[in-house]
Image (spheres, grey):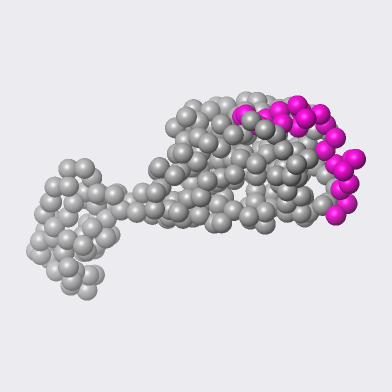
Amino acid sequence: MSSYDMPATQYIHWPDSFYQTTDMRNQYDADIRQIVEVFNRYLGNKYPKSNYHDLDWRLVKAMIWIESGHKHSAWRYRPMQIGNHGDAGLIALLHLKKIRLKNGNFRIQSEGAELVIPPEYVSNLTIKNKEKIRYNPQLNIQAGVAYLLMRHAKIGYKTVVDNDAKEHIVTIKVDDSLNKIAVTHQTTVGIIKQLNPGINKCNLHMGVKLRYKTATVKKTIKGWVPMTFSSVARKYNAKGDYRYRQKLRYAFQNIESSWFKVVY
């Protein structure tokens, strides 16, 4: 993700650091706070066992300062710089990445964005709105926050038993395997083993009856990478500015300080 040339922390001096007016400097505060609040509420409720810690809206504000900054036109329409030409962030967020299968066909690869985007923003962050995300500052912030959180999410899988929870019986046939039975009967190997203790690939005999419930394996968020200045630099800025971490720390500390404190 591209970053503009704001001086590194040790080279920034007050007169030439953030010299825009207070109104401009805090232009997106209301948007950032509202957007981050929506994400925090959704992720905290959706994944109560994931140990989610609320994202600090001031961190997003600091990112915007060093991603676009007041000196550049991008401040007006692409404050978080997601969607720049050649940027892989928006491609990952909107499921635009294709991978080639062994049979030569292509499959759209999801990197987990659907797990972090709140229902309120699902219709905003779509392929159809790709250009709007690049030129609408509020949508750009939504996309940037979603990408930031997606990159910090620890993705895993869980077995979800269908609501009916009714047990079924299947009789093992010639050449059956646990995987084959699971796929054929819309269940999982884990559920079959759970309902049939001791069963394994070595004792699958024709004619043996197995119990199962219909179930699916779904992608979920198991936990979160602790969000630090270093993690944001590594996961959001990726191959961009090598001084990103220093700049982010400096901007965040200044937002916390009395120089930039805004009373609401």
Count of marks placed on residues = 0
Is residue 127 visible to the viewer in this orientation of the structure? no
Q: Which quadrant of the rendered structure holds the C terminus? A: top right
Is residue 128 visible to the viewer in this orientation of the structure? yes
Which residues are drawn in magenta? 10-31
Question: Percent from the top left, x then y, of residue 143?
Answer: 59, 36
Task: Name which residue lies at 73% across and 48% down.
Answer: 253
Question: Percent from the top left, x then y, of residue 257?
Answer: 74, 44
Q: Nearer the viewer, residue 194 or 116?
A: 116
Question: Percent from the top left, x then y, of residue 147?
Answer: 58, 43
Q: On the picture, is 219 further left or further right than 78?
A: left
Q: Nearer the viewer, residue 92 or 176?
A: 92
Q: On the picture, is 91 further left or further right than 122?
A: right
In the displayed image of the protein, which residue is found farthest to the bottom?
Answer: 202
Membership of 18 in magenta stretch: yes
Up-down relation of residue 145 to residue 135 (above or below): below
Task: Name which residue lies at 59% across and 44% down.
Answer: 56
